[in-house]
Image (spheres, grey):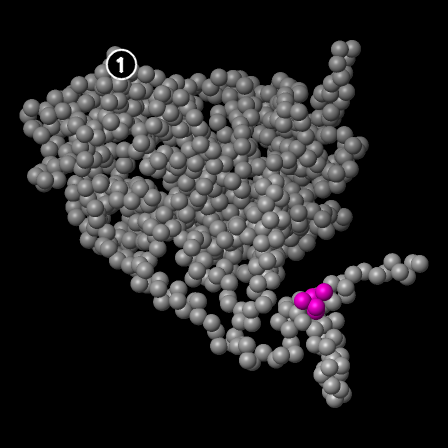
Amino acid sequence: MVEEENIRVVRCGGSELNFRRAVFSADSKYIFCVSGDFVKVYSTVTEECVHILHGHRNLVTGIQLNPNNHLQLYSCSLDGTIKLWDYIDGILIKTFIVGCKLHALFTVAQAEDSVFAIVNKEKPDIFQLVSVKLPKSSSQEVEAKELSFVLDYINQSPKCIAFGNEGVYVAAVREFYLSVYFFKKKTTSRFTLSSSRNKKHAKNNFTCVACHPTEDCIASGHMDGKIRLWRNFYDDKKYTYTCLHWHHDMVMDLAFSVTGTSLLSGGRESVLVEWRDATEKNKEFLPRLGATIEHISVSPAGDLFCTSHSDNKIIIIHRNLEASAVIQGLVKDRSIFTGLMIDPRTKALVLNGKPGHLQFYSLQSDKQLYNLDIIQQEYINDYGLIQIELTKAAFGCFGNWLATVEQRQEKETELELQMKLWMYNKKTQGFILNTKINMPHEDCITALCFCNAEKSEQPTLVTASKDGYFKVWILTDDSDIYKKAVGWTCDFVGSYHKYQATNCCFSEDGSLLAVSFEEIVTIWDSVTWELKCTFCQRAGKIRHLCFGRLTCSKYLLGATENGILCCWNLLSCALEWNAKLNVRVMEPDPNSENIAAISQSSVGSDLFVFKPSEPRPLYIQKGISREEVQWGVFVPRDVPESFTSEAYQWLNRSQFYFLTKSQSLLTFSTKSPEEKLTPTSKQLLAEESLPTTPFYFILGKHRQHQDEKLNETLENELVQLPLTENIPAVSELLHTPAHVLPSAAFLCSMFVNSLLLSKETKSAKEIPEDVDMEEEKESEDSDEENDFIEKVQDTNNTGLGEDIIHQLSKSEEKELRKFRKIDYSWIAAL
């Protein structure tokens, strides 16, 4: 049974991987990136997520390697803390409580006991660069309140701050100014471009900055696409700069190589440019990276680069400018038209991805599986151009079919509409275009749904449109003399008084079809396509429509734009109940009768879980999000939970996910036992549940034979010593890395006490001579052995001489027990 705690809203993945620069480990085996409240550790070779460092209570805003220990990582957050991690084992070592929001983090090797951070103290838009002293202490949480001011009036983006020449100075850019602070002199120099003083040249403002690792050289990126290299900036009057220009739009980020022989730049062209020797003639390109380059990082070893992109992607690049790995997160599209869907085959979350694509995203591994190109046209990145939008999508027939709708409309009278039907191919393990229908309706399609009944003989698709019609499409035989084929064709067209059709859905058994025409709900027979009945409450246009499931299949639910939730009984054709609720999302659970409804208020979004059979909600949670929730979906669990509380039982079979306006993917969760385990405990559990691989079968018998010998030796000992595997202190000592262990003086007493025998352990004198230690261990033969002992005792009580009774030795007793275990049942068959 799951330990029941309060349900809380948690980020389940899909967070931005491109929010800050990624950081490489010293050996380039791992790459670290911030992801919402977490820090994720990925392998640069396999692209797999190795660890998730979770401990911050707010957005993580910066990560840096510990310059004094390359196996440790610093992270800062808006929760006002700096945490030190052992990223190899995923262990939190220490937490430094600063007490104010931290917007970025920097480390310098020369500052051994300090780090640098960006904070805002006075006004929300004024940021400062400060030095934070990290006190040395043996406790887990330490207050770090000693802040030293370095620079004022800076940009909060870490791309606008750079430390140069081994921490001798720090450069900061904001708007049209470059500020350089020298730590030894404790002076600040400020520079500006002459052209920026003229208002006509407004594109000279700074966008990013980078410093040469060994020389006094500062590179700055600008809105006009130019890169300027600043030198001799120790003197305010003798400073010089040279220009490099290739980017046609703003320079998004800059980074020097480890040796400083080349400069990397990126922007909206999706091209990584390497300026070798900082000259315009000697440059190399890595084009077609897919999206705008947001950040550029260089590994400490110098053998790898990485670029973070606007489509939530990280590309790992070799020194010779060849892409070696891609870490793809949840793509944040401009708007999610298709809503949230679940692929019945892969259980992946499906929604709009790159322009013109559907993305299949694994919720378990928080990783994109693949993209499906729907529009199949080259995307032109032009803000003034009206693009073809993927507006609708739906799965049918248990994942065998996929329907998509794409449209483009420049003017009201110029509508380009196309519907495509995709068939799943088992050989290619993907969807193949089967049917393309141009202008399936005369106006925009508002809804489409498949009939997913288990007993459905023929695949059926229904589309509803603003043109006042809904159309039924069926799969027919389209074979000819050349090949066998199937295709989709229109079978029925329905309407109701020329009202706009807004929603459509099938009942669970597929016998009924519900189509809403503005304020009126119509019920149709799916066999004869006859109109059965209508429901009209005049409570506003129907926004959402769905049937009940399982024992509640006789109910139909509808939510209106005027904030009324109605429930109709299909058997009595009457209104069962209604409630005043401004429903924005309404989703039925496919595995139960529960329905989740999310309402919008002035304060935020609220969740209501109920059954259509009764208007009383099973569960209510206020304030699940401060912003508007746009989409939601139930995802069936692979392993059901076992909540006993009535308020939590709706989470047993399925998990509910929802997407906010800012495209944050959230879910509901309770604290499971898995979260309570320490990383070392998880490692111990993993070792105990290792699979039986072929290598195990090779050495399995040998290990079993060794274990049997060890058991025989232990059986002959009267005093049983506790096994070291069962002592927590020993297990933690053996599995915890040496560089994160406490001092030996602290561990000594705990280790020695764990090896001492408890008082309950009996000595050899306290154990009766009649009882054999080996017989107590063998539970299978306990009854037989007790009978044998009783017979021996009865013989001793008769007073016969010792020469008549032969005392059996331990070896003879073992031989006797072997004979007793032999099966003699075959004699009965003679």
Kindly state the secondary structure of the residue where label 1 is placed.
Answer: loop
Question: Who's the residue at 74% across and 18% down the image?
Answer: 485
Q: Residue at x 64, y 37 (%)?
A: 344
The three-letter code of the residue at mark 1 reads Asn
Within-10-Å neighbours for mark 1: few <14, some 14–19, many 20+: few
Q: Main secondary structure of the magenta part?
A: helix
Q: Residue at x 56, y 80 (%)?
A: 766
**What residue is pinned by disc 1?**
282
Q: Quadrant of the C terminus?
A: bottom right
Closer to the camera, 546 or 501?
546
Q: Position of residue 604 (x, y in %)?
A: 45, 49
Residue visible at 41% across and 40% down in the picture? 41
**Residue 148 versus residue 793 in the image, above or below:** above
| Residue 822 makes an appearance in the image | yes
In the rendered structure, the answer to whether residue 522 lies left or right of residue 410 reads right
Which portion, as a residue range, is magenta? Answer: 811-815
**Which one is in front, 260 or 191?**
260
Apparent side of residue 58 relative to residue 658 in the rendered image (left or right): left
Would you say residue 813 sits in the magenta stretch?
Answer: yes
Q: Quadrant of residue 804?
A: bottom right
Residue 182: image location, x then y, percent: 12, 37
Which quadrant: the N terminus? Answer: bottom right
Residue 202 in view in this figure? no
User: Where 752 falls versus 274 (above or below)?
Assistant: below
